[in-house]
Amino acid sequence: MDQNMKYGSDYKPVPATSIKSGQSIEVLPELFCHTIQIVNICLAGNPETKEFVLIDAGMPGSANEIVSVSEKYFGANSRPKAIILTHGHFDHVGAIIELVKHWEVPVYAHELEIPFLTGQTSYSEPDPTVEGGMVAKMSSLFPNEPVDLGSNVRKLPMDGTVPHLPDFRWIHTPGHSPGHISLFREKDRTLLAGDAFVTVKQDSLYKVLTQKQEVSGPPRYFTTDWKAAKESVQELSSLKPAVAVTGHGLPMAGEELSKELEKLAQEFDNIAIPDYGRYVDKKQ
């Protein structure tokens, strides 16, 4: 294991939380969602065999909580076969270094996300000028420098398979970040969407704190390519997911998910794309 890992110099705890922080949901018999402050992690696997995979790595300073949740479902001293990252924004890799050191497991991400996970490239700065609520206005405080995982991060297989999750395939869903991915399981139409779309209006502080549920576009303050984001939502909508777990907000299923996701795909320009902001080009 490569021990020479480090976070960006701007990494720090972010004082934002929601009423669901610390709560876990058994979405399906072998799929668990846990909320850490304002973001979700997923654990996919069989509690009987104790084999599982962690999807995303939470907020800065959350490693102990993630280990505790993993052991709650999969037993004492359990560890995942791998960590899969939907993307590398600070709230999805906040505890990644501590977890890699503790578990000594590989990390997988899309090849276009690798530069942001090996210290080579910083993300575009969050946009506090974007149309939106208080969280958007606060976003200049959010870390955007890259984490450096060295050789501990690997490219996802090009054939769409997901290591140690044979029933899932990964789908490139850029827009929110260049190498953003979502995971989909065809047999029961389960979707792990990351931040391609979310089920809470993430730029609104009130809705983040209360977790008022609604299908919304990707978080505005970090999304830099709205054309790609729209195409990604349309692709995910075409899969007709029966249940969706997103990076922010509560899991959603059934007719409510179908109607709201289809509406988002059809009316993306009006619902998701802000009227103004640093990364907004209304001509697109």
Image (cartoon, helix red, strand yellow):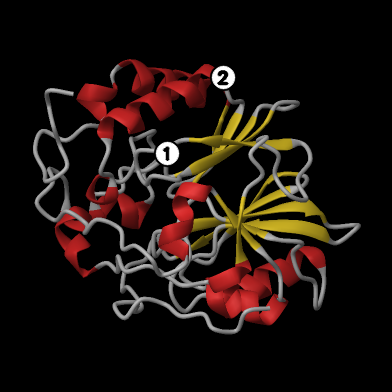
Of residue 13 and residue 7, the one placed in the foreground of this image is: 7
Q: In what element is the residue under mark 2?
A: loop
Q: Can residue 190 be seen by looking at this rendering?
A: yes
Q: Amino acid at mark 1?
A: Ala
Residue denoted by label 1: 196
> Residue 107 vs residue 119: left or right?
right
Residue depicted at x 63% and y 39%:
158
The residue most toward the bottom is: 3
Residue denoted by label 2: 240
Quadrant the N terminus occupies: bottom right
> Residue 75 vs residue 72: left or right?
right
Residue depicted at x 45% and y 18%:
259
Q: Which mark is residue 126?
A: none
> Residue 89 vs residue 29: left or right?
left
Q: Can you give x and y, in whole percent of width and height, for residue 222 in the image?
A: 27, 51
Q: Can residue 19 be seen by looking at this rendering?
A: no
Does 58 appear above or below 45? below
Q: Can you give x and y, in whole percent of width and height, for residue 10 in the image?
A: 29, 77
Q: Amino acid at mark 2?
A: Lys
Does 82 appear above or below 184? below
Mark 2 touches mark 1? (CB < 8 Å): no
Residue depicted at x 31% and y 63%:
122
Q: In what element is the residue under mark 1?
A: loop
